[in-house]
Image (tube, coloured by chain):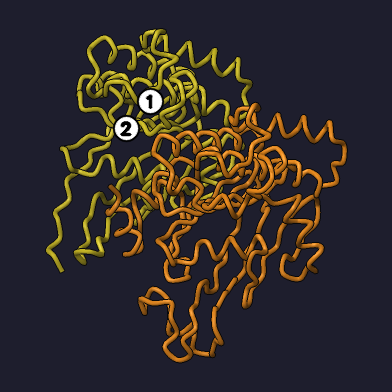
Chain colours: A yellow, B orange
Amino acid sequence: MNTILSVRDLGKGFYIHDRAKHVPAAEGISFDLKPGQLAALVGPSGAGKSSLLKAIYRTYLPSSGQVLYRTAAGALVDLASAPETRITDLRRAEIGFVTQFLHCLPRLSTLDVVARPLLQQGVARAAAHDKAARILTALAIPQQLWDATPATFSGGERQRVNIARSFTQGGRLMLLDEPTASLDPVAGENVCAMIEAAKAEGTAMVGIFHDMAVVDRLADVKINVERKAFEAVA
Amino acid sequence: MKPILDVDNLTRIHGPGCPACLDVTGPAHDTNLCRHCGSVVAVADASLRLHKGEVLGIMGESGSGKSSLVKMLYFDDKPTSGRATFHDEGQAHELFSLNDAQQLRLRDTRMGMVYQNPSLGLNFDISAGGNIAERLLMSDELSYRVIREKATALLARTEVPPARMDELPRNFSGGMQQRVQIARALSTGAPLLLLDEVTTGLDLSVQARILDLIMELQEVTGVSMLVVTHDLGVVRHLTTRTIVMKHGRIIESGLTDQILEDPQAAYTQQLVSSAL
């Protein structure tokens, strides 16, 4: 099988102008990923795992290295340096991100929030709602909540809505930032099952999980991320 | 993605201007006032590209030049130098080379503007429905019945009760006035919409509903938008790419989430970290 994602010597650091300080987050990360594989970023808290994930998605601008992604059309794109419109196109159609935090407008219903990425792709409303409903059911979000806005939900519920949205959108590459954190065991199991199903369908994933048992269960590749020493204040 | 608008080196100097104006103003000098001739450099060398169906944010504090930039694009003000090309219906219009009649024509039918202050975008002396009818008339729609139907549908879509379409907008709340402005701007099916601080000064709950409405209309119509705002929340919810301006200059641009979470310029870092 062909490689879908090849991360080469990826590094991310921040320059904080206010304090004239350079803060390194991660350096020299390399790995390859094939369709259906999951790479888990493992390492101590503060090692830069989330920063790496965001650098792959381009929420953070990578400081060094390449993020080579093979598109559905067969083109090779360096996500670290591709034009912004290329990135937005890929995010809409191929690359998803599950964050721990959900930003949504207070008026949208849960069903609309979850179906939204599909609507943006041009999927018909009924079909988008169908798929959203299936995923919400699989994640055991009670149907009474579907009309309400997630802005009023608890942290764990919001997180599941967020996961539901990402999996409704699907994609060829999904980036998961602690998708099972703060979930109860049943909900956590539902999410793991959904990740396994997506892998079986060929979705490649890069994920961070606080629970090593989940890593052992889901990961095909483990990437060790070391904590970086902070540089002295200049 | 195809471009709909290309802005090249747009500059607007208020005052006599002198050869040093651009060299002694800008973020590096922390001013937009030329110390040699006293001119104000509102916008300097601004270049950007807006793609079809894209929502681009222009962010910056008061006086950064963001409103001046869109005002020129809507012909409310003339640039000192620079170009803007509007790609529409297979033609490339050089906005500042067109004659007055051509400019008016584009402004009335192919572009829409929503101002922070509704009194700039609406005629307060005619009814809400009349405000929409006026724009439809300018786009050569002459049937009273069609105009009335379209106005009713547009107001319904922007959630203005049809029962109030014959009232004067001056009697409306700020949020409702913005809805009428949006309906008017959308009435001719223009492919380019300019939004200048449209939610500034409204209650938070009203702001959220207006943002919702804009987002929904954008998705349904695919209209391209330039969204001028100082509000990080507006940028986060509406836009995919963002430009940051200071002292008339574009100092940074990028994906909106990247600008908000990993800003590169010192000023943007300050701006983002000072959000409540």
Q: Which residue is mark 1?
A: A162
Element type at mark 2: loop
User: Do marks 2 and 1 share a chain?
Assistant: yes
Disc 2, disc 1: CB below 8 Å?
yes
Image-based side of B27 in relation to A13, left or right: right
Image point (23%, 55%), residue name:
A24
- Which one is nearer the viewer's eye here, B45 or B207? B207
Q: Earlier in the sequence, mark 2 or mark 1?
A: 2
Q: Three-letter amino acid code at disc 2?
A: Phe
Image-based side of A45 in relation to A83, left or right: left
User: Mark 2 — on which chain does it sit?
Assistant: A
Which of the 4 image quarters holds residue A191?
A: top left
Is residue A83 shown to the viewer in this render? no
> Residue A60 shows which numbered tag?
none
Which of the 4 image quarters holds residue A163?
A: top left
Q: Which residue is mark 2?
A: A101
The CA distance from mark 2 to mark 1 is 8 Å
Q: Position of residue A133 (x, y in %)?
A: 48, 12
- Could you tell me which quadrant the C terminus of chain A lies in? bottom left
Image point (51%, 54%), residue name:
B228
Count neighbours of disc 2 (C-alpha within 10 A) and say few if under 14, some if 14 to 19, many if 20 or more.
Answer: few
Q: Position of residue B219 (x, y in %)?
A: 60, 34
Q: Position of residue B208 (x, y in %)?
A: 44, 36
